[in-house]
Amino acid sequence: MSDQSTNATLFLEKRSYRRRRLKDALRLLPVVGVLLWMLPVFWPSGGGHPADPAPVAMSSAITYVFVVWVLLILAAAALWWVIGERGRAEPDP
């Protein structure tokens, strides 16, 4: 006896699948933001040794943080807009 439910593949509609992946990307955005904001911690700070790389200016680090912040806001707005547009395009069951 073979059970067809074990051999059947799960079919997901393209629109709902993409919408779920967009929601996943929206949920992952804060994690990406935290990782990007932690990046300046690894930049050279200039040690006492002459072979150490030149330190990164504080103004460059602050500019980086605010640019990442603005890009995260724009990415979240774009993802939210796409999710909303796809939701309006789907017919009500």
Image (spheres, rainbow, N blue to C red):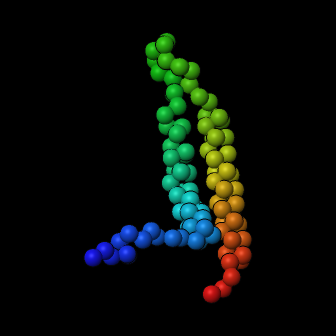
Vertically, is 71 above or below 57?
A: below
Vertically, is 13 above or below 32?
A: below
Residue 19 appears in the picture as rendered: no
Vertically, is 11 above or below 75?
A: below
- Residue 67: x and y in percent read 67, 45
- Residue 84: x and y in percent read 69, 72
7 with respect to 47 (left or right): left
Asked where in the image residue 91 lies, by quadrant, the reply is bottom right
47 with respect to 81 (left or right): left
Q: Nearer the viewer, residue 71 or 92?
A: 92
- Residue 87: x and y in percent read 67, 75
76 with respect to 4 (left or right): right
- Residue 56: x and y in percent read 59, 28
- For this orientation, the residue located farthest to the top is 50
Residue at figure coordinates x 52%, y 39% from the top left: 39
Residue 10 appears in the picture as rendered: yes
Residue at figure coordinates x 52%, y 58% from the top left: 28
Residue at figure coordinates x 68%, y 52% from the top left: 70
Quadrant into which the N terminus falls: bottom left
- For this orientation, the residue located farthest to the bottom is 93
Residue at figure coordinates x 72%, y 75% from the top left: 89
- For this orientation, the residue located farthest to the left is 1
Quadrant into which the C terminus falls: bottom right
Q: Nearer the viewer, residue 75 or 43?
A: 75
Vertically, is 52 above or below 86?
A: above
